[in-house]
Amino acid sequence: MSEALHVVCPHCDTTNRVPRARLGAGGKCGACHRPLFEGHPLPLNDPSRFAKHAEGSDIPLLIDFWAAWCGPCRMMAPIVEQAAQRLEPHVRLAKVDTEASPDVAARFAVRSIPTLALVLHGREIARTAGVMPLPQLIAWTQQHAGITAD
């Protein structure tokens, strides 16, 4: 299991090769030299940037589809923030504002918010909707992504 994984930089969107065995060490981007993981959800409202992260990375992307006017979405925000700290580097968390990025929301046929979609190589693996507590979110993600948090 020493093969390299493709990990997209959250800062400059460059695809980096990271040895699987060293994924837990984090690492820095070869282009911008900033950390590949910072334990925060990544805003991905730009469709081309979203595609780069959703399709070009070998680690699953957990997307929180939300909107500023949505009360349950605001309740879910700190839970998603905490989940990023627990799940990275095995899962990248992202936030997509459905008002700012209706094309991405339409691509995933988001009908209600908050919706969480787990994606790998551009394909949806799992989806859930509504607010859930942090332990349930961690367990749901680990189950569907086939990983365990460090």
Image (cartoon, rainbow, N blue to C red):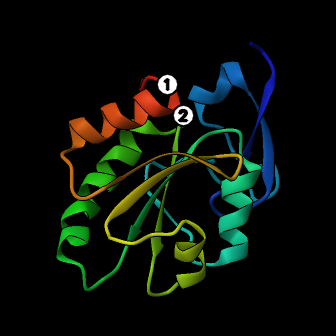
The answer to whether 80 appears left or right of 33 in the picture is: left
Residue 137 position (above or below residue 33): above
Mark 1 and mark 2: span between their CA atoms?
A: 7 Å
Q: Secondary structure at mark 2?
A: loop
Most foreground residue, 18 or 91: 91
Residue beneath disc 1? 147
Q: Residue at x 24, y 79 (%)?
A: 70
Q: In the picture shown, does residue 150 fall above or below 90? A: above
Residue 12 in sight from this viewpoint: no
Q: Are marks 1 and 2 in contact (CB under 8 Å)?
A: yes
Could you tell whether 60 is left or right of 111 in the image? right
Above or below residue 47? Residue 21 is: above
What residue appears at the point 54 percent right and 34 percent down from the top-left corner?
90
Quarter of the picture holding the C terminus: top left
Residue shown at 21% from the left, 56% from the top: 131
Residue wearing tag 2: 90
Quarter of the view holding residue 18: top right
Query: To which quarter of the image does residue 95 belong?
Result: bottom left
Q: Residues within 10 Å of mark 2 (few under 14, many from 20)?
A: many
Of residue 29 and residue 94, the one placed in the foreground of this image is 94
Q: Residue at x 42, y 30 (%)?
A: 142
Disc number lying in front (1 or 2): 1
Q: Is residue 43 visible?
A: yes
What amino acid type should be assigned to the residue bearing mark 2? His
